[in-house]
Image (cartoon, rainbow, N blue to C red):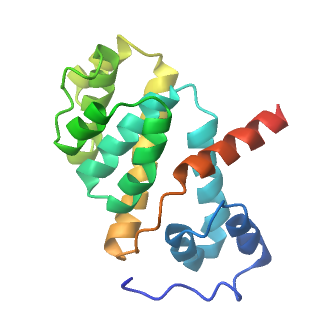
Amino acid sequence: MALIPYPNLEKISPEAKEMLRRLPAPANIFNMMAHAETALKPVMKLGGTLLGKLELDAKLRELCLLQAVKVAGGEYEWLQHVPIALDLGATEAQIAALEAGDDRAACFDACEQAALVLTRELVAKDKGSPAALTELRRHVSDRVVVELILMTGFYTMLARLTETLAVENDPPIGAALVRGIEARVKAKT
């Protein structure tokens, strides 16, 4: 049971109601976020950008996202994003390695290992080391480095929300959510 009650969704602003209606299914994380209704739309839009408009490879994004929430203790986001990662080509061995905390496992290529190490450092040490940053830059552009740092911070924030407030887990809607975001992005281009 959540540590604070969910807001009455009938009493939130029309803008906040509209943002919640965009979801493929109700989600406790966004319902809880509706307490901060003026932040709901910007947070959801940033989340949509991170899931659908980055140069950062989608599979790599999901591996690093899972790394971030595993290190941060974000069970809610882990459960939502494992199916997305698998849908994008991550393997069961990669998921198991992340769950075990082995970001240097042989199932990850050199780029993935570099990104996962930097992600772990960002969450566990509050910043990446110069060595981890240098290694990642051997594989990706500076833009991708910055996108990875932003994505890591965003999902760590969500883990802090769900874990601090004991937001109840939902059945995974992540893959449907990502497909919806991708479709909206494609329709606008």
- Which residue: 47% across, 64% down? 171
* The C terminus sits in image quarter: top right
Which residue occupies the foreground of this view, 105 or 30?
A: 105
Residue 157 position within the rendered picture, expressed as x and y whole percent measured from the top left: 41, 57
Residue 22 position within the rendered picture, expressed as x and y whole percent measured from the top left: 72, 61
The image quarter containing residue 149 is top left
Residue 14 position within the rendered picture, expressed as x and y whole percent measured from the top left: 79, 76
Residue 30 position within the rendered picture, expressed as x and y whole percent measured from the top left: 56, 68
Taking the image as shown, residue 141 lies to the left or right of residue 25, namely left
- Return the residue found at the far front: 92
- Return the residue found at the far top: 138
- Where is 52 relative to 1, above or below? above
Residue 48 visible? The answer is yes
Residue 150 visible? The answer is no
- Where is 70 relative to 92, above or below? below
- Which residue: 43% across, 26% down? 145
Which residue occupies the foreground of this view, 30 or 145?
A: 30
Taking the image as shown, residue 143 lies to the left or right of residue 187, namely left
Which residue occupies the foreground of this view, 52 or 178?
A: 178
- Return the residue found at the far right: 188
- Which residue: 39% across, 82% down? 2
Which residue occupies the foreground of this view, 80 or 54?
A: 80
Count of labels in the image: 0
- Which residue: 36% across, 53% down? 78
* The N terminus sits in image quarter: bottom left
Taking the image as shown, residue 54 lies to the left or right of residue 1, namely right
Taking the image as shown, residue 93 lies to the left or right of residue 20, namely left
